[in-house]
Image: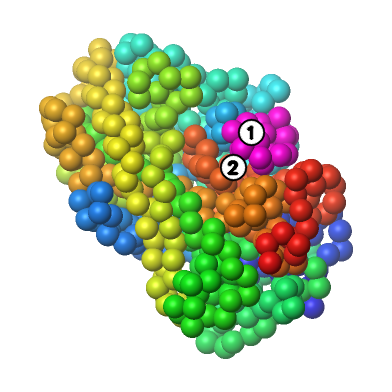
């Protein structure tokens, strides 16, 4: 018997495993479907895309996207200790303060910017910035790039020449502008959630971690979560909790597990022969993500990451943890508004000193660089639904990309912005020919068609177990599942809307605050109601 059972060792699960065991004698079991984080590609920053479609990746695909050339989009998600923080590009971005103030304004009391900033700071150990917006001494080391490429530095200069502000701290007073990203690295090595939180916690006797443990359902009896069933090594097992079962599986796995456990849209559950415990229509809905498009040019020989695996660069990394292999690929960025005058950015650029195609699967044929306008305020919404009642089968993922015309229009503006920046003096001595049709498309309609044909996920799905004060929300403001006692969700699925930026730091923030809620260190938001009374 455990006090807490955590399902999923991604960013949220690792944070909770640490915080719940450090503060008390609570007995905690953490179940992870993937394996240990022992692959060397996890540690070496520039090799993260080699983890895609391996045993460290769930390897999801969406259903065909009818507004995006009828394509099935590849969605990598971490299936390993550390979850997606073990396979991501390590960019440390919190989002815009308006994201969280918007949550609060829409009823999520206690989740405004002033409420969540202390939790961002609690996790952080920033190597350079010391001010009211940043923390030192936390588990997550945040550093500047070790060896930024001349191409990345040229982007920042060119963005300034194109009229954009320069910004050396996207997480400070202002998000807008161009600069180099700060990264979750220590001395040229990845700092995943497993590195920062889980490994120290695993030294404590009150934490048990089981890998290769695929949870098949939450056991709900009499309206209370009593434990879980899981399969490990082909053997079906059961674990019981005297306190809470906490789902940390993310925007895909968490709603799937809720539905497999009888918590979800009743008609959909019955279609798959699942007994309904709670008719929760919001489970799996509100799925949204950040789509990115690539605009690419050839570059002067020797300036791009095409040389990252030469003997000289390998030696430089092994001896000093520097050079091209220390790169996170997306080294520089820009936050801007597609209209040129909006108050809150709707575009984020991910800039790589390499020709980055198809999630890195396609090897670059030349030296080059990629500018990646990314839509950070998508209007389109989709869903996660069950394909079957088999826990081992992937669910149907339908983000419904570009269902709303505003999403395409913003990205069209982003492509034009990228081309304007690439035409500035800072790039002219480095830039060669355009390397794809996106850089040469003329009309808005031609650009839009290229976007539909080539856009990819930036790996930031959220929202499928939306937090809110209303009965239609899946979890209340303390993240308790409505209609079931002893069951909570702590991961990116609870976000009502996706933050303006990469989602790893916000997910850790949610888990930091959830730990304080669970342990009673902070009072619950005024509108958070007892879960058992809220949704039955």
Residue at 63% x, 75% y is: 277
Q: Which residues are magenta?
A: 100-118
> Is 158 located above or below residue 366 in the figure?
above
Q: Nearer the viewer, residue 535 or 38?
A: 535
x, y percentage for residue 215? 58, 75
Residue at 54% x, 58% y is: 282
x, y percentage for residue 231? 56, 82
C-alpha distance separating marks 2 and 1: 18 Å
Left or right side of 247 for 153: left
Residue at 76% x, 53% y is: 529
Q: Look at the image and say whether residue 102 sits in the magenta stretch.
A: yes
Q: Look at the image and say whether residue 92 sits in the magenta stretch.
A: no
Residue 339 position by quadrant: top left
**In the image, which disc is placed on residue 506?**
2
Q: Earlier in the sequence, mark 2 or mark 1?
A: 1
Q: Residues within 10 Å of mark 2 (few under 14, many from 20)?
A: many
Give the quarter of the figure containing the N terminus: bottom right
């Amino acid at each position: 018997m455990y006090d807490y059972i955590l399902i999923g060792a991604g960013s949220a699960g690792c944070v909770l495993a640490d915080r719940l065991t450090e503060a008390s004698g609570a007995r905690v079991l953490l179940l992870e479907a993937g394996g240990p984080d022992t692959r060397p590609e996890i540690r070496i920053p520039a090799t993260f895309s080699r983890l895609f479609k391996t045993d460290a990746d769930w390897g999801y695909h969406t259903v065909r996207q009818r507004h995006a050339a009828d394509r099935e989009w590849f969605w990598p998600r971490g299936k390993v200790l550390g979850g997606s923080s073990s396979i991501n590009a390590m960019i440390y971005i919190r989002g815009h303060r308006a994201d969280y103030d918007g949550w609060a304004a829409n009823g999520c009391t206690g989740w405004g910017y002033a409420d969540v900033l202390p939790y961002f700071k609690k996790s952080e150990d920033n190597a350079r910035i010391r001010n009211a917006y940043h923390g030192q001494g936390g588990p997550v080391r945040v550093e500047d790039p070790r060896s930024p490429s001349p191409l990345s530095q040229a982007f920042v200069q060119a963005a300034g020449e194109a009229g954009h502000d320069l910004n050396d701290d996207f997480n400070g007073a202002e998000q807008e502008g161009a600069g180099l990203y700060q990264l979750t690295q220590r001395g040229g090595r990845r700092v995943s959630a497993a590195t920062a939180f889980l490994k120290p916690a695993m030294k404590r006797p009150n934490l048990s971690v089981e890998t290769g443990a695929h949870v098949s359902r939450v056991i709900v009896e009499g309206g209370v979560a009593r434990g879980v069933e899981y399969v490990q090594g082909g053997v079906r097992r059961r674990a019981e909790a005297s306190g809470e079962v906490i789902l940390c599986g993310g925007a895909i796995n968490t709603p799937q597990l809720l539905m497999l456990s009888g918590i979800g849209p009743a008609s959909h559950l019955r279609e798959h022969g699942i007994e309904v415990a709670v008719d929760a229509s919001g489970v799996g809905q509100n799925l949204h993500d950040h789509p990115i498009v690539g605009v690419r040019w050839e570059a002067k020989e020797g300036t791009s990451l095409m040389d990252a695996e030469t003997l000289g660069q390998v030696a430089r990394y092994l001896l000093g943890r520097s050079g091209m292999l220390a790169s996170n690929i997306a080294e520089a960025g820009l936050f801007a508004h597609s209209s040129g005058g909006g108050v809150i950015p709707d575009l984020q650029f991910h800039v790589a000193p390499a020709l980055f195609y198809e999630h890195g699967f396609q090897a670059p044929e030349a030296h080059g660089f990629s500018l990646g306008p990314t839509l950070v305020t998508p209007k389109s919404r989709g869903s996660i639904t069950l394909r079957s009642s088999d826990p081992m089968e992937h669910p149907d993922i339908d983000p419904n990309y570009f269902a709303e015309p505003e999403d395409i229009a913003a990205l069209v503006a982003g492509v034009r912005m990228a081309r304007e920046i690439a035409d500035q003096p800072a790039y002219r001595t480095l830039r060669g020919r355009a390397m794809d049709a996106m850089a040469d498309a003329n009309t808005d309609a031609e650009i839009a068609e290229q976007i539909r044909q080539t856009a990819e996920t930036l790996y930031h799905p959220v929202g499928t177990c939306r937090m809110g004060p209303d009965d239609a929300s899946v979890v209340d403001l303390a993240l308790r599942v409505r209609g079931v006692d002893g069951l909570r969700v702590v991961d990116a699925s609870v976000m009502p809307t996706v933050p303006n930026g990469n989602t790893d730091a916000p997910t850790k923030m949610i888990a930091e605050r959830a730990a304080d809620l669970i342990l009673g260190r902070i009072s619950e938001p005024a509108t958070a109601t007892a879960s058992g009374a809220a949704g039955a």
